[in-house]
Amino acid sequence: MEQLAAWASAFGLSLDANQLAQFAAYEALLLAWNERISLTAIRVGHEIRIRHFLDALTCATVTGPLDGRALVDVGSGAGFPGLPLKILYPDLRLTLVDSVAKKARFLELVAGELGLRDVTVLAERAETLGQDAAFREQFDWATGRAVAELRVLAELLLPLCRVGGHVLAQKGDSAPAEVAAAGPAIAALGGGPATVSTIRLPETDKAHYLVLIPKIVPTAGRYPRRAGMPAKRPL
């Protein structure tokens, strides 16, 4: 885990001994549970630290400090990027969302085993939460990693952001094209112009991209549409 700390430091992020111990425990749980349910195709600790832990932590290079902020991570799966950001910023108010109940149970276990407080795990569809007054426009940040193309993801995430908040999407090579295609959808959902930051992880030959979308006006009440519609008929 000392290598993880060094990699994080290269991005201007600091991890102390307790945080590194939490990451070690997280890695062990991820590897153990991955034998029972499909959480990640990456099954080597070294690769988990780069492609999952560090990759998630790099979100902090564009969010800035998140202590005291409310963040919802949609399609969280094995907890990325939400749980690493919670380890980095212990006072982050984190909500993890995954429609698969087994994955939600894993997320609850990790939060409990790592002693992470103020973590809510929901086995629910983002479309449903986006129309629930308890969650709609309640978050400073809404994140998504490997969930859907940006037109779809914007409809899932922007309704959850408060005005003045932001969507943060982690994307691969398709990011520039997705941003160009998603402009009208983002505007219709209350978002402002997207910006893209390039991230290069150690020991990898491909760039990753962080797509940042500000929420500038409230989302129209008809969005998000009912479950499945954003993906079936993207805006």
Image: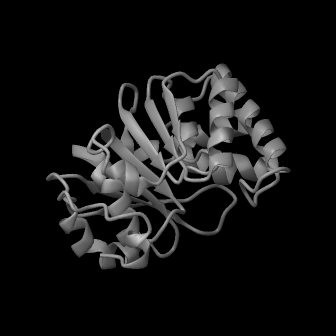
Asked if one can make out residue 94 in the rendered structure from this viewpoint, the answer is yes
> In the visual, does 105 lie left or right of 65?
right
Q: Residue at x 33, y 51 (%)?
A: 130
Give percent across and percent down for residue 26.
71, 35
Classify 193 as above or below 14: below
Q: Position of residue 179 (x, y in %)?
A: 34, 72
Q: Residue at horizontal 36%, vertical 25%?
A: 68
In percent of width and height, residue 173 lies at 51, 74
The correct choice, above or below, for 143 with respect to 17 in the image is below
Q: Position of residue 56 (x, y in %)?
A: 55, 47
Depth check, front residue: 105 or 168:
105
Indicate the colouring scheme: one colour
Q: Is residue 3 left or right of residue 171?
A: right
Q: Is residue 147 left or right of residue 134?
A: right
Closer to us: 145 or 8 = 145
Does residue 68 sit above or below 134 in this rendering?
above
Asked if residue 39 is positioned above or below residue 72 in the image, the reply reads below
